[in-house]
Image (tube, helix red, strand yellow):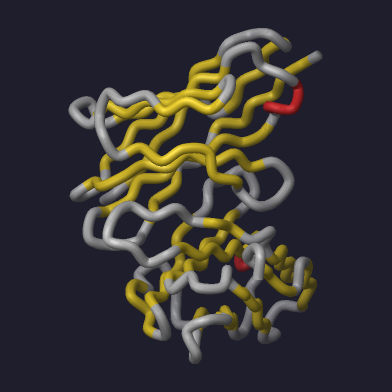
Amino acid sequence: GAGVSQTPSNKVTEKGKYVELRCDPISGHTALYWYRQSLGQGPEFLIYFQGTGAADDSGLPNDRFFAVRPEGSVSTLKIQRTERGDSAVYLCASSLSISGANVLTFGAGSRLTVL
Amino acid sequence: EDKVVQSPLSLVVHEGDTVTLNCSYEVTNFRSLLWYKQEKKAPTFLFMLTSSGIEKKSGRLSSILDKKELFSILNITATQTGDSAVYLCAGNLSGTYKYIFGTGTRLKVLA
């Protein structure tokens, strides 16, 4: 697509529920990132994929968080047993996989509210 | 631990003023630094800096990197109300595609 698409744009759920957030990157971009942004903070790195594999998942806060990218394009961030502290905007970004420095193109984000 | 620190945290100016936003970094094996503007939702790309002392310029915005002192600045001249936003900088680790973001500087330009 022309840009990075994220769905849903807003998600309200209850504590303890399971949620999935979807990211559709720019066509041809092999690198895909998930960040989490809390109010008044900068984006916090969660995970990035190079193709289908998670190249670095060091930012996932705990084992309730999991992300997949089975065909090297669309990615899903999965959060189990949601907690109120998970409330944030989840940003997805993609970039061309090049040998030099790379520019991230962000989607509009999915705002998650856990009641 | 890798970190990026931005200052000031917030800034209020009047239209026509010039502002300088600061970004200092401690990033292992630093490779590049990115500046973004964030209004309502998605951060939008402004500049990528990889080499010291080379100014990048786009209209009223410019940025420069100092790899010896580990900082970058973003200048905005003749500010307009449309410049009101959060400005983010991010440092990239060499050998990876992982970017570490600062907290951002919230700029408000008054008419």
Query: At 49% from the left edge and 91% from the top edge, which residue is drawn?
Result: A70
Location of residue A111 (image quadrant): bottom right
Q: Quadrant of residue A76?
A: bottom right
A81 over B76 or under it: above or below = below
Q: Position of residue A57 (x, y in %)?
A: 38, 74
Is B88 or B80 nearer to us in this picture? B80
Residue at 50% from the left image edge and 90% from the top image edge: A71
Which residue sits at x=26%, y=51%?
B1
Asked if A79 appears above or below B9 in the picture, the reply is below
Q: Position of residue B83 (x, y in %)?
A: 68, 27
- Residue B34 x, y percent position in the rendering: 43, 42
Location of residue B17 in the rendering, given as x and y in whole percent from the top left corner: 64, 8
Q: Nearer the viewer, residue A30 or B110?
A: A30
- Outermost residue, bottom side: A70
Looking at the figure, which quarter contains the C terminus of chain A?
A: bottom right
- In the figure, is residue A106 to the left or right of B102? right
- State the residue at coordinates (62%, 43%): A40
From this view, report whether residue B5 is shown above or below residue B45.
above
Residue A33 visible within the image:
yes
- Residue A61 visible in the displayed image: no
